[in-house]
Image (spheres, rainbow, N blue to C red):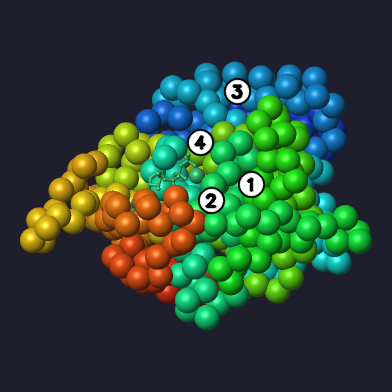
Amino acid sequence: MTTRHGHERLAEPLSAVADPRGGGSVLATGRVSGLKLAEDGTASAILSIDGLPGRAAQALEAEVASRLRAVTGVARVRIIQTSERHQSGATPETDGLAGVRHILAVASGKGGVGKSTVAANLALAFRRQGRSAGLLDADIHGPSAHILLGVKSRAGASAERRLIPVEAQELKLLGMGMMADPDRAVAWRGPMIAGALVQMGTGADWGALDILVVDMPPGTGDIQITLAQKLRPSGVLLVTTPQALAVADARRAAALFRQLDVPVLGIVANMARIDGPGGAALHPFGKADPAALGSVLEAPFLAELPLDPAVTAASDQGRPLATGPVAQALDSVAARLWQALETRPAR
Ligand SMILES: Nc1ncnc2c1ncn2[C@@H]1O[C@H](COP(=O)(O)OP(=O)(O)OP(=O)(O)O)[C@@H](O)[C@H]1O
Ligand SMILES: [Mg+2]
């Protein structure tokens, strides 16, 4: 929850900070935007570092942070650096995502809650509904789409050295697990990861697609920010287990995406129950409370998925299930997401 009052209190001290490139205060030039003061005392801001040499950018960030920290009611400060210059910079002619109608990120914050499983099976659900669909596995260090979908082949390259997605299970697919040497990425750091994401996103030949699902890596850090900036998803689906620990991470992820202007289109509670024989259900991660989840994450609750051993086995074998409770629930999630995406302005 943010307040207008909070925004004004944060803006005031920044009106005295000049943009190092001239033109007035950092607020007047738009260098600092997205000021927010959350109820827990977290002040956040977006700082554009365009045209600033590294040292100047760091100095400005430090100054903005210290001014915000001095505001009454601010317990901590979070500044997100962005750079237009480092965005894809792709023109419509070279943007391999130009023919993609919607890009949907699947994210969680917490690791291991089932993002990849949901992303892959959701892409298949879109396909079942007659949409042309793709899956971009954006987890550079821990790719899994190739395993989940049983992909053995590697991505090709066009004469212009653009990546050509692999086609399997009637989906277009790209991910580190489909590259010539997937192990090479293990030691990659920030800029190389960003480069790989650009190559697999705007730098690849995705052609015409109704929807591209992006399986995000866990966390709420630089990689997620880079992804949101480079791929500019139309929205994000949050996956969480019902456990408070996972929901807290999902909440951080929701806040991050909102700050980056990517709307949270829905929530899925994964592994929310185990259906036992005779209709009895176990709740290994607690019971999902749709109303509570919806209000904490400020987004529509779309479905709860059971922990289905058949899904675990199918994932390991690379043969996802088109039927069963998980597939069925994702069919309805896909339909609702499609509706939400179609009512949004085109990319
Ligand atoms: N609904 C489900 N039913 C059964 N098994 C599931 C379900 N969802 C996820 N799993 C299993 O849980 C484990 C974690 O799932 P997955 O790899 O999709 O999570 P993740 O959030 O993508 O993890 P990471 O953060 O490492 O990327 C896997 O072993 C997967 O097969
Ligand atoms: Mg994953």
| Image-quadrant location for residue 262 | bottom right
Residue of label 2: 147
Q: CA distance from mark 3 to mark 4?
A: 23 Å
Left/right of residue 337 with respect to residue 278 in the rendered view? right
Percent from the top left, x then y, of residue 289? 21, 51
Judging depth in this view, the residue of 144 and 254 nearest the camera is 144
Left/right of residue 219 with respect to residue 49 in the rendered view? left
The amino acid at mark 3 is Ala
| Image-quadrant location for residue 201 | bottom right
Graded by Cα atoms within 10 Å as few (under 14), some (14 to 19) or many (20 or more), the crowding at tag 3 reads some
Residue of label 4: 219
Identify the residue at image location x=44%, y=22%: 75
Image disc number at residue 177: 1
Q: The N terminus lies in which quarter of the figure? A: top left
Left/right of residue 200 with respect to residue 227 in the rendered view? right
Residue of label 3: 65
